[in-house]
Amino acid sequence: MGKDSNSNPRGGEETEFSSLGNLAAEGRRTGVWLGSPGYQAQDWLTRYGYLPAPDPGQAQLRSAARLRDALKLMQRFAGLPETGSLDPETIAAMQKPRCSLPDVLGSAGLVRRRRRYALSGSMWKKRALTWRVQSFPQSSGLSANAVRYLMKNALDVWGVECSLTFQEVTSQEPDILIHFARAYHQDSYPFDGQGGTLAHAFFPGEHPISGDTHFDDEETWTFGSKDDDGIDLFAVAVHEFGHALGLGHSSAPNSIMRPFYQGPVGDPEKYRLSQDDRDGLAQLYGRASNTPYDRPTRKPLGPPDPPPAPPPDSPSTPVPDRCEGNFDAIANIRGEIFFFKGPWFWRLQPSGQLVSPRPARLHRFWEGLPAHPLLAPADLGVPTQ
């Protein structure tokens, strides 16, 4: 009997070579460019825990079945149909802004149980925790007072459910140190600019970095934005503090611990965790003595400053659709391709992936530019016609 062209010497399973080729073929059929055949998706699945790191001696022996299982699990976390195929919806989900931490902790069986939440296996041994903001966002319209207000409320969202208390300190070394950083910042989770990964936090423990929470300072952090411009700081902070208390990512539809950015969650003083999040927290710290609907009164640090209003002589500019083309200018800057249109721009990474499908504001990225600059091709070194 002749050999099947898709078999391998270890038992006839389809190998990574052929399975990734099939994924790439699916991308070509649907008009989605994947770069090198499927490897971007594989790297993404490995980075977030769906696939184990490849063995250097057996780098090409992953089966198609393993890749399909990994995609199905990823689709569950993203709230997508579990097809096991690298379809356009799955690729789009992989490009969404999200948390830096892996989605799968240890065995993938963590999310196959009746519950959806996952536990990191660590927790704080005390009930009174301290926190401090070490550095503030440099290019955000939020004041330091507004950032502290949002951090305080994001912590209290968890505390009222399990009787943990959080005290802001100014001098002593806190349990939870909050830092806005860029790119490589002396931990194993470097940031990648606007879009992509937004923040991460470290699980409880005895290490000096345990509980610390980092936000990407290149993001446009906002609160109460009316034009959906930027990333809501309060929503991301609630998510990251869940990690700082010992929770992993969840696949439950309404959980704040889902790994992908879900947008604003509303009033910080009225927001309440989903049942899945409360159940996960109770497994670590028990439930609060007060009833779930009888939240204690909290004294805020002060109301956050309102988001800056657009200049009075400049009406709000609608967000452009990149599919319409007609860009004002295109430039190659440090190996990335920038597409400019009015006060907006998109960034295309060397891998061929957009940093974010949503455009970013010029004045948020290049500090000092006006909110509505007048672009001319010559300004960016592009020959005029």
Image (cartoon, helix red, strand yellow):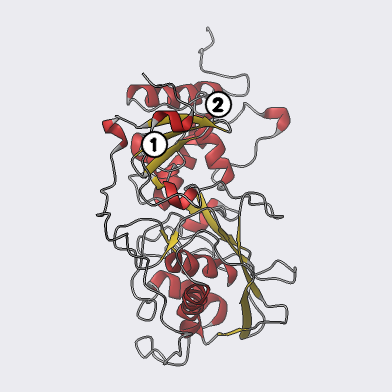
On residue 249, the disc is none
Q: Which residue is painted at 54% across and 47% down in the image? A: 193
| First of labels 2, 1 by sequence position | 2
On residue 16, the disc is 2
Quarter of the image with the C terminus in it: top left
| Quadrant of the rendered image containing residue 34 | top left
For the residue pair 312 and 13, the one nearer the viewer reads as 312
Q: Number of callouts in the render? A: 2
Q: Which residue is painted at 59% across and 19% down in the image? A: 8
Lateral position of residue 284 relative to residue 32, left or right:
right
Q: Secondary structure at mark 2?
A: helix
Q: Secondary structure at mark 1?
A: strand
| Rendered location of residue 339, percent (x, y) | 41, 34
Residue type, mark 2 in image: Glu
Residue type, mark 1 in image: Phe
- Give the residue at the far top of this rendering: 2
| Rendered location of residue 217, percent (x, y) | 55, 57
- The answer to whether the residues at label 2 and label 1 have Cβ atoms under 8 Å apart is no
| Rendered location of residue 74, percent (x, y) | 45, 46
- Position above or below: 60 against 245: above
- Give the residue at the far right of this rendering: 207
Label 2 vs label 1, nearer the camera: 1
How far is disc 2 from disc 1 in space, using C-alphas? 38 Å
- Position above or below: 100 against 39: below
Whether residue 269 is visible, yes or no, is yes
Q: Which residue is mark 1?
A: 340
Q: Which residue is painted at 47% across and 53% down in the image? A: 98
